[in-house]
Image (cartoon, rainbow, N blue to C red):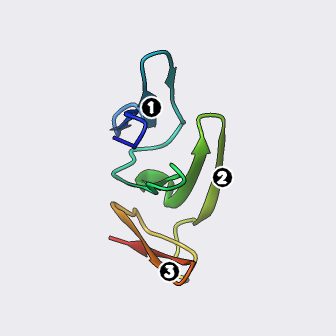
Amino acid sequence: MDREKNIYILDRINHRVTKWNLFDENGNQLNHPQGMFIEKDSLTIWIADTSNHRIVKWISPNQSSVICGSQRSANDQFNSPTGIFIEFNNGLKELFQV
């Protein structure tokens, strides 16, 4: 739940994240997502999109982007990420696969 009382549901079987509030329902097409991290100040959602081997940044229900990923072993690639953690350090964001 975010500070505005919206609830985010990670729906792995239906390949989406759904945001629920009193008036709206929105989703995002994913493939077996298994982890997410919500920035409490900006409400940005980071998603471990497991079967697509990528990390997705969801800024709003209508705006998302692939931050990094594909199935390989380089620093910007993943092999079935199942969790995500963002560390904020002096204004910089560091992304960790869990």
User: Nearer the viewer's eye, disc 3 or disc 1?
Assistant: 1
Residue type of the residue flagged with mark 3: Ser
Q: Nearer the viewer, mark 3 or mark 2?
A: 2
Of 50 and 64, nearer the camera is 64
Name the side, left or right, on which 7 lies relative to 94.
Answer: left
Residue name at image x 34 percent, y 34 percent: 13
The residue at which mark 2 appears reads as 65
**Residue 73 image label:** 3
Q: Secondary structure at mark 1?
A: strand
Give the SS element for disc 3.
loop
Q: In this view of the protein, which residue sits in the foreground, 71 or 14?
A: 14
Position in image of residue 70 (x %, y %): 57, 65
Closer-to-camera residue (23/35)? 23
Q: Where's the N terminus, which quadrant?
A: top left
Numbered mark located on residue 71 in the image = none
Mark 1 or 2 closer to N-term? 1
Count residues near mark 1 (Cα–Cα under 10 Å), then give few for <14, some for 14-19, many for 20+.
some
Task: Please name the residue that numbered disc 1 is placed on.
Answer: 19
Q: Earlier in the sequence, mark 3 or mark 2?
A: 2
Task: Kindly identify the amino acid type of the residue bearing the numbered disc 2.
Answer: Ser
Give the amino acid at mark 1. Answer: Lys
Give coordinates of residue 79: x percent, y percent.
43, 68
Looking at the image, which residue is at 32% across and 70% down? 98
Question: Crowding at label 3, few (<14), some or many (≥20) Cα neighbours within 10 Å?
Answer: few
Q: Residue 86, how many percent across, how many down?
A: 43, 70
Marks 1/2: CA distance?
Answer: 17 Å
Give coordinates of residue 25: x percent, y percent.
48, 21
Q: Is residue 86 above or below residue 55?
A: below
The quadrant holding residue 3 is top left
Asked if marks 3 and 1 touch (Cβ < 8 Å), the reply is no
Whole-angstrom CA distance, mark 3 to mark 1, is: 32 Å
Q: Is residue 14 left or right of residue 54?
A: left
